[in-house]
Amino acid sequence: MSNEDVTIERIVAGGDGMGRLADGRVVFIGGTITGERVRVEITTNKKDFARGTALEILDASPHRVSAPCKFVASGCGGCSWQHIAVSEHMSTKVAIVHEALRRTAKISEAEVLELVQTGGSVSSQASRTTLRMATLRMAVLPNGKLGFRRGLSNDLVETSPCLVAHDLLNEIIASAKVKNATEVTLRCGASTSEHGVWLHDEHGRGQVTGLPSDVGVGIESLVHEVIAGVKLRVMMTSFFQSSLEAAELLVDAVRLAAGERALSGVDGRVIDAYGGVGLFAATLLSADVPVSVVESSESSCRDAVVNLSKHLAETRDTSQPSEIVHSNIEQWSPVSAGLVIADPARTGLGPLAVSRLVATKAPRIVLVSCDAVAGARDLRLLIDAGYELSKVTVLDLFPHTPHIETVSVLQRSNR
C-alpha cells in the first residue's frame, strides 16, 4: 500500500479525520484532528474514496493530548477520541452536527447556526453504569477475565480498571472470571449501589465466578436508578442510558424541548415512542397525564409497567387511559396526540416510522437522536411531512468517543 502526506480538513461523523489525496479523492484516517498534517498508509482503495492509517503526525494539533487511559497503548478500541483534549470534544461534536444538518437535512448554513445550541456533557471519567464487555467465541480472555476489543479487531485487551466505568463496575471487572459466554453486560445503579451481570449465553453453559456477593446474575437480574427523583427499575436485558449523568442530562433537555404546556397534557395525549423502561414518561409527566409508551422490547415493557404504575392507575380521563404498547413503531396504530417524544435506536426512525408519528397530528415532536447523520435524515423526513425545525441541542453523553446525542424540537406547520 502507498503512503501520502495529508492535511486533515475536518472530523466527520464516526470520528475519523477527513483529508484529500493527491488525486483528489477523500481519505478517512482515525486518530487524527482537524488541521493536522499526517503521513498516511492507504489501507483501503476505492474509486471515490480511501481509508488509511496515520503512520506519523507531521504537524500536530494544539489539542492533541496523551491518552488518559493506559490501555489505549495496549490497543483498546473502546474510546477512540482519547487523543483529543476533553475540552474540544463538544465543539468537535457540534461541528459534526452542523455538517450533518447541512449535507443530509439540506438546511442552509445560516439556519444551522441559528438552530444548533450546546447542551451538557457528562464526566469524562468513572461515569458509565452500563458496559457490554466484548468476548471472543466461547471464551473471554484466556484467563477468563473481562476485556474490550482492540480497534478494528476481534482480539481482546484486558482493561482493569476501565477509565470511563463507574467504580461499582470496575469492582466486577477486577474480580470476575467468565467461562462459556459470548459477551457480558454489566450494569449498576449509581444512586442505589445495586449491580448485576448478564451472560450472553445461547446454550445455558455460561459461568461467572469471583463476583461480590450482592451482584445479581442472569437474564432476570435488575437494578434501580433514581432519575429526577423517580426510582426506575431496569432489567439487565432492557435498554437504558449509559450513565446516571447521561439520563439526567437527557431528561432535562427533553423537558425544555417539550415545554410545560405539552407535558401537562393540555394539548392531548403524550406519545413516548421507543419509550424503553419509561424514562421520559415517568420523570416528565404527572400521573394523571395520558401517555402511550410504545416499545418493542419485552423486558423494557415489563419495566415500564412497574415504573409507570401510578400513571396506569391514575389517568384523569378513564376513557383514554395511559398504556404500555408492546410493538414496533412501524406496526403501531397511531392515535391523536398533543406531544410526541421519540428516542429511536442509532439507525433512526426511517420513512415508515415517521409516517406513524406524523399521523398523530401532534403539534410538537421532540426527536432524540444518537447518530448525527441518521438524526439529520429523520429531520428532513419530518420537515417534508409538514413540521418546522426550531431547535437542535447537542449533548456529549459518551466521553472520549465520537458518539453524539441530539434533542431536536419540531413544530407542526400551519401551512
Image (cartoon, grey):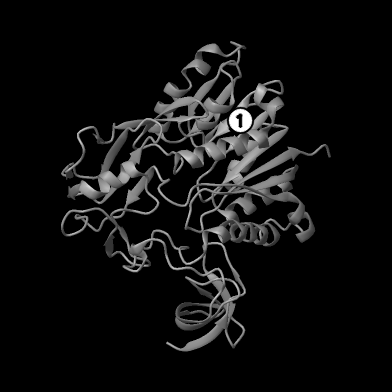
- Residue 260, given in percent of the width and then of the height, sits at 69, 27
What amino acid is found at the position of numbered circle 1 in the picture? Pro
Question: Mark 1 highlights which residue?
Answer: 334
- Residue 148, given in percent of the width and then of the height, sits at 31, 58
Considering every residue shown, the one lying at the far right of the view is 415
Q: Is residue 359 visible?
A: no
- Residue 79, given in percent of the width and then of the height, sits at 42, 59
Q: Please tell me how crowded label 1 is: few (under 14), some (14-19), or many (20+) other residues with Cα within 10 Å.
A: some
- Residue drawn at x 66%, y 59% is 104
- Residue 130, given in percent of the width and then of the height, sits at 38, 43
- Residue drawn at x 64%, y 53% is 376
- Residue drawn at x 77%, y 52% is 114
- Residue at disc 1, secondary structure: loop
Closer to us: 78 or 269: 78
Closer to us: 31 or 106: 31
Question: Where on the picture, by quarter, is residue 281?
Answer: top right
